[in-house]
Image (cartoon, rainbow, N blue to C red):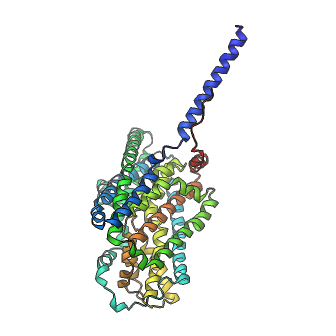
Amino acid sequence: MPDGESGSRAALGGALIEVDTAIADDSAVSIAPPWHRRLYVRVLLAIVAGIIVGYLSPKVGSALKPLGDAFVSLVKMVIAPVIFLTVTTGIGGMSDTRKVGSVFGKALAYFLVVSTLALVIGLVVGNVVHPGSGLHINPATLDASTVAKYASAAKDQTIIGFLAHIIPKTLISALADGEILQVLLVAILIGLALSMAGTKSAPLLTVLNSATSVVFKLVHLLMELAPLGAFGAMAYVIAVFGIGTLANLAALVVTFYLTSILFVLVILGMVARMAGFSILKMLAYLKDELWLTLGTSSSEAALPALMEKMESAGCRKDVVGLVIPTGYSFNLAGTNIYMTLAATFIAQALGIQLSMSDQILLVSVAMISSKGAAGVTGAGFIILAATLSVVPSIPIAGMALILGVDRFLSECRALTNLIGNAVATVVIARWEHALDESALAEALDRTKRMRKPAQHVA
């Protein structure tokens, strides 16, 4: 065979091998796993199973509560290490520590605007829809003892107490207690120290980066237990509170869910569009975390996975580490909508007419009291109690009216809070020029590329 022909065939063979390898590699990246192995599918099936078990056998359903509690506890166990390592390594690797103040300043400004807007929207919807009108409940018939523990917990929700609580007793106690803002403060300080130390901190940064990889591997292992946790939590909710509870206060539940959905699609949708991405694609990208949050009624359960997802979507590590943990205390749009809507519902149900000054006071107090609410079940109810304790027009005993459905409302609060923090992370990363546009586009368009395996070139 002539040398030219041999060389051509060799070149063609090499090209075919390269094409075949490229297709195989692309397939390995973009082929979706079998449906039964996808986390959100397993969590969804677990939620449905939990509803069925809780409805058909309340005794069994109520006994399954430890499954949900155990899973949330397992996730909370790794939240402090995830925040500490992400923030410390992110800031420690920065050459310009002034960026930390820039990120914080922009994040707090964004949180203030969006949170205030959420409060106003909840108030406006309450005044327009009037979900509590027609109940005509006599305030004297209310059982204040049912909300006594929430009112007691609300007394601790003061600005001075909140700010003082951010400072831990020791560097180690912050990690041991798992307080998000305390861990964040310690991580920022240590990260700044590492950055200022220069090359001397390189060995420690290497160790911390390695530890970060290990911790996120642990997160992945724990997420495999998510269906079990969602099953137990949902079975307990349905068994104890009952689906019939929803019917009794359907107007409030439906109004709150619709308001939250419109807030996400319209308000956050416009914010996302201005930031250059689609809110619908973001929701699809976060489907695992959303189903997990729905199943456990806690946005905190999805915090570690959310941080990893946003970093994979092109947001710089230090921005993710600063914005998301801070947002879990200062950017709770779902909780804010709930507070003003629930307050107006209680007033309407009791036949109390709120004046304009009462409503301005309600929003003003809620703006302050909502800061520091944790992303765990029941926190929104406590913050509402703290708000009403300062607004004399609405008796705090009126919260007994919504106690039965608060668990169902907390799921929507948690979902809205999680989505809001995801959007905030991308927006602030873009403002800081800390967003990899190609990585974001690839992450959000990934589902489109989930196709059948490509055929190899023969």
- Residue 376 lies, with reference to residue 173, above or below; the image says below
Placement of 335 over or under 357, stated as above or below: above
Image position of 431 (left or right of 395): right
The residue nearer to you, when weighing 284 against 232, is: 232
Q: Nearer the viewer, residue 250 or 337?
A: 250
Q: Position of residue 456 (x, y in %)?
A: 60, 30
Residue 178 shows in this picture: no
User: Quadrant of the rendered structure where residue 152 is?
Assistant: bottom left
Quarter of the image containing the C terminus?
top right
Taking the spot 45% from the left edge, 91% from the top edge, the residue there is 351
Between 390 and 256, which is closer to the camera in this rendering?
A: 256
Asked whether residue 328 is in view, the answer is yes
In screen coordinates, is 12 left or right of 381?
A: right
Q: Is residue 179 left or right of residue 27?
A: left
- Count of marks placed on residues: 0
The outermost residue toward the top is 1
Q: Would you say 276 lies left or right of 364 here?
A: right
Q: Position of residue 21 (x, y in %)?
A: 58, 29
Please tell me which residue is depicted at 35% across the width and 81% down the height of the picture: 400
Residue at the (38%, 82%) spot, across then down: 401
| Above or below for 50 versus 85 | below
Can you say which quadrant of the picture contains the N terminus?
Answer: top right
Across and down, in percent, residue 155 comes to 32, 77
Q: Position of residue 265 (x, y in %)?
A: 58, 65
